[in-house]
Amino acid sequence: SLEQLSQTATVIPHIDKNGGELDLIFSDVIIIPSTICHEGLTFDVTEIGDHAFRQSFASSILIPSSITKIGTSAFAECSKLTSLTIPNSVTSIQSAAFAECHSLVSLVIPDSVIEIGGGMFYNCKKLRFVTFPKNMKCIADYDDYRSNFPYSPTSESIGFFEGCTALEELIIPETVTS
């Protein structure tokens, strides 16, 4: 979606001709551009919107340094995603951003991130290592999971690391109080 006034763009799910989301992206590598051109104007791509790459089949996603926000469930259910690098430009990662990424092994969340939503790693079965930003204050549950994952057998609330059975190491800063 394009914001004319600020000349910024948000990556959103593909919409079919009937207005429904087409979540499935079959490319093995997804490269998100830092800018796009539309009708002679250049727009900075600054956000990955809610559900933007949900259920894609990519094993690798390249995020440009123009991105500042990763939306709710943006990469949820990406069953082949093994790793990705979050650039230092990102300041916000919303709830369940990586939920049910069954192949995700590790993730470093840069110190630039000041807002992290709940349930971020729900059911990431192969997740082994996570490094959090130095100034993080809270690791939260996600209380609105059922509305985003209506076919899930889980309850209304999910834990941040619930279902992460391979988790070996967490580097949690001393600033986390809850």
Image: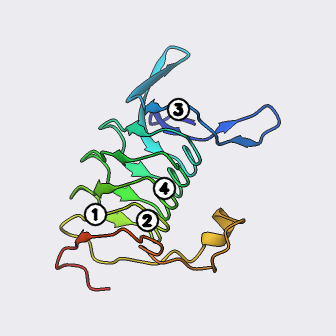
Q: Position of residue 104 (x, y in %)?
A: 40, 54
- The residue carrying mark 1 is 130
Give the CA distance from mark 2 to mark 3. Answer: 34 Å
Give the CA distance from mark 4 to mark 2. Answer: 8 Å
- Tell me, yes or no, whether the two marked residues, 4 and 2, touch with CB atoms within 8 Å: yes
Looking at the image, is mark 2 or mark 3 nearer the viewer? 2
Q: Looking at the picture, tell me which residue is in the foreground, 123 or 111.
A: 123
* Residue farthest right in this picture: 18
- Tell me, yes or no, whether the two marked residues, 4 and 3, touch with CB atoms within 8 Å: no
- The residue carrying mark 2 is 121
Q: Is residue 81 above or below residue 111?
A: above
- The residue carrying mark 3 is 4
The numbered mark, 2 or 3, whose residue comes first in the sequence reads 3
- The residue carrying mark 4 is 101
Badge 2 marks a residue whose secondary structure is loop
The residue positioned 57% from the left and 36% from the top of the image is 1
Q: Is residue 150 left or right of residue 159?
A: right
Give the CA distance from mark 3 to mark 1. Answer: 37 Å
Q: Is residue 172 left or right of residue 44?
A: left
Q: Amino acid at mark 1?
A: Val
How packed mark 1 is, by other alpha carbons closer than 10 Å (few <14, some 14-19, many 20 or more), is some
- Tell me, yes or no, whether the two marked residues, 3 and 1, touch with CB atoms within 8 Å: no
Q: Is residue 17 left or right of residue 155?
A: right
Q: Amino acid at mark 3?
A: Gln
- Tell me, yes or no, whether the two marked residues, 1 and 2, touch with CB atoms within 8 Å: yes
Q: Position of residue 161 (x, y in %)?
A: 41, 73
Badge 3 marks a residue whose secondary structure is loop
Q: Position of residue 24 (x, y in %)?
A: 64, 39
Q: Quadrant of the C terminus?
A: bottom left
Q: Is residue 152 left or right of residue 58?
A: right
The numbered mark, 4 or 3, whose residue comes first in the sequence reads 3
